[in-house]
Amino acid sequence: MRLITLRDALREAMTEEMRRDPRVFLMGEEVAEYNGAYKVSKGMLAEFGSQRVIDTPITELGFAGIGVGAAMNGLRPIIEFMTWNFSILAWDQIINSAAKVRSMSGGQFGCPIVFRGPSGVAGQLGAQHSQSFESWLANTPGIKVISTATPYDAKGLLKSAIRDENPIMFMESEVEYGVEGDVPEEEYLIPIGKADVKRQGTDVTLVTFNKMVKVALSAAKTLAEEGIEAEVIDLRTIRPMDYDTLIESVKKTNRMVVVEESWPFASVATEITYQIQRRAFDYMDAPVIRVMGADTSVSYAPNLVSAFLPNPTRIIKAVKEVMYLKK
């Protein structure tokens, strides 16, 4: 086992899969000559050449469409968005082509493609560059949505995504690219659709994903100092979601708090809350509470960015509320 950064884990996943399968190629803005906007694709142009590591113009709709067409015709593209905020321009290709082509063609065409890049708030980037898209995309049948928090998960899940026969939306975090974590030297895959228990606990279940995992673990550490043991579950895959792991945890803890940095309306947390009350109502000692981003656009001012995001203090307050403790 060695410590590597999230960006290096992603690069290893793509490089290994491109060596293994000549049909895999990478395309996006600045992925080649500039080594990637966040240096995720550093050195890949030198190894694979300009036919497989392809710089594009600033035309998300155009290169997403090229990727979808390539996938329908037997290739396995990885399309990098400099940020998922820019992907909105390409949603006609993602939603109306990639997600629907298998169904509309009666299975005659598939679309094994990975769209990847950073999602969510990354500091002072303003309202148009600070949005989370997991719940938006997970609303669409025909695609899978993955959102990663650690180098280990990012590498194993990206390799699985590249080999998958379906269109995959792969969400990363701009502020996590330099974070280090343990990653094995040997090859491994992580199954899509399987959550991971990042911390065992007995008193309350904290469910989250992407960079909020770190925030939830911080809250759990503080709670432990007060004698409250929180179980922290990293969803990893948003669609298909691993409800079984969530339910098994609730059977043990009888309480749940869901943490998500996105807006509260029609969120991933909303869906989890519904499914838990439907499937595990008899095990619950309190209603599920959500700790969400604020129901407003993200501001540029640092203090307002902090006010927008979930934090350990808000999570601890929610935990004490579901445990009926004094606030």
Image (cartoon, helix red, strand yellow):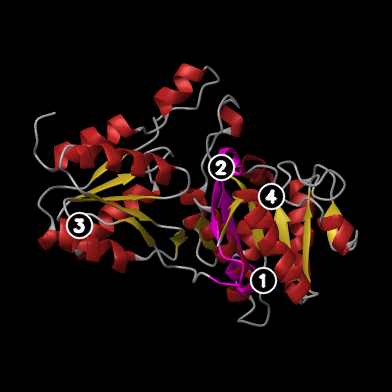
Kindly check if marks 1 and 3 are in contact, taking CB atoms under 8 A apart as contact.
Answer: no
Badge 4 element: helix
The answer to whether any part of residue 100 appears in the image is no
Q: Is residue 222 magenta?
A: no
Badge 3 element: helix
The image quarter in which residue 187 lies: bottom right
Front position among marks 1 and 2: 2
Q: CA–CA distance between discs 2 and 3?
A: 33 Å
Front position among marks 4 and 2: 2
Q: Position of residue 110 (x, y in %)?
A: 66, 76
- Identify the residue position indicated by label 3 in the image: 277
Q: Is residue 179 magenta?
A: yes
Residue occupying image coordinates x 71% and y 70%: 17
Residue occupying image coordinates x 75% and y 52%: 41
- Identify the residue position indicated by label 2 in the image: 176
Precedes in sequence: disc 3 or disc 4: 4
Precedes in sequence: disc 1 or disc 3: 1
- Identify the residue position indicated by label 1 in the image: 111
